[in-house]
Amino acid sequence: MSKENLKKFKSPKVREKGNEPWVVLPNSHDLADWTQDDQISYNQRLRQKAKYEFFQNTMDFITDNRIFGDYYEFGCHKGRTFRMVLTEARRHNLDKMNFFAFDSFEGLPEPTSDTSVEIWKKGALTTTEQSFKEMITEHGVYTGNIKTVKGYYDDSLTCELQASMMRSGTKAALVNVDCDLFESAVPVFDFIEPLLQEGTVLYIDDLFAGYKGNPMKGVCRAFLNWQSKSKWKLMPHLQIGWWGRSYITYADESLPVGVL
C-alpha cells in the first residue's frame, strides 16, 4: 500500500461548510489509485478497531459487575483478539483470570456446509501453535495464565476436559466464538454450556459472516440451535461491526428462551 493511500485510513476530519458540519472525505482524485489490496486492508483496519473497542468496553463491564472468571477463545488465528484481551485484562488488573486458546492450529477443517467465502477451505486461516505461543510470549502480558488446547473441536472439546474445567471452580467471564463454520461451532456451544455463569459475556464473531447473513446457516444456525435447548437466557449486549454481536447470559425460568 502506498503512503498516500495509508493516509486515507485515518478518521475523517469534520469542518464547517455553509454553517453546517462537513465531513472531509477522499474524492475521486484521491481514490484514483485505490486497489483491491487497499480495500482489504481498509476493511481489516475497521474490523480490528471495532473488535478492540468491544474488548475495552466488555472488560469494563466485567470488572464493574464483579464477574469473576476466565476467558475462552475458540479460533485464535494470528492472535490478534487474544492480545487485545490480554492487554485489557491487564489494564483492569484481572490477575486471576486464565486465558484459554482453543484452536486446531492447523486451520479450518474440511467444510461440510456451503459458504459464500471462497477462502474457507481446509487448512485456511492457519496459525501454528508454536507461532501463536511466540506471538503471545512476545506480547508478554499474563503469559503464566495462558493455556492452549490444540485440535479440531470434535476431538479436543472432550467430556473429560469439560469436567476438569468444571472442577476448577472457575466459570467463564468472557467467551469469544470465532469459528467461521457451522460444524465447528456446534461442539463449542455444547462444551461451554455448564461453564457459563450469570453475567458471562458471549461474543459471536461470525454471526452474519460467510452465509450472506442467512440465520439458518453457519455459526448463526449453531447459535440458534443451542439457544433453543440451553438453560441460559441471553440479553443483547453490544454490536461489533456488521458481523458480530455479544450477549449477556442469565437464568430466569419465567422468561422465554433466547433472543437474537
Image (cartoon, grey):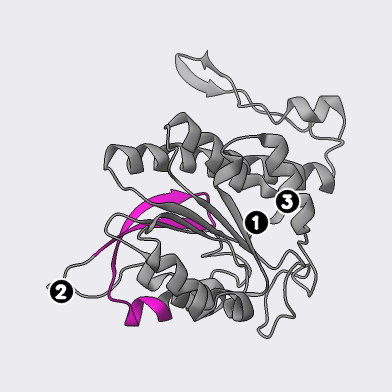
- Name the residue that disc number 3 marks: 132
Tell me, yes or no, whether the highlighted magenta stretch contains residue 88.
no
Mark 3 belongs to which amino acid? Answer: Phe
> Relative to 213, is 58 on the left or the right?
left
Residue at point 46%, 73% (across, down): 162
Mark 1 belongs to which amino acid? Answer: Cys
Q: Position of residue 245 (x, y in %)?
A: 45, 57
- Name the residue that disc number 2 marks: 253
- Name the residue that disc number 1 marks: 76
Q: Is residue 199 above or below residue 97?
A: below
Q: CA distance from mark 1 to mark 2?
A: 34 Å
> Relative to 39, is 249 on the left or the right?
left
State the residue in front, 116 or 123.
Answer: 123
Whether tag 1 and tag 2 are in contact, CB under 8 A, the answer is: no
Magenta residues (range): 225-250
Q: Mark 1 packing: few (<14 Cα in 10 Å), some, or many (20+)? A: many
First-in-chain label (1 vs 3): 1
The image quarter containing residue 166 is: bottom left
The image quarter containing residue 115 is: bottom right
Residue at point 72%, 69% (across, down): 117
Tell me, yes or no, whether the highlighted magenta stretch contains residue 243.
yes
Whether tag 3 and tag 2 are in contact, CB under 8 A, the answer is: no
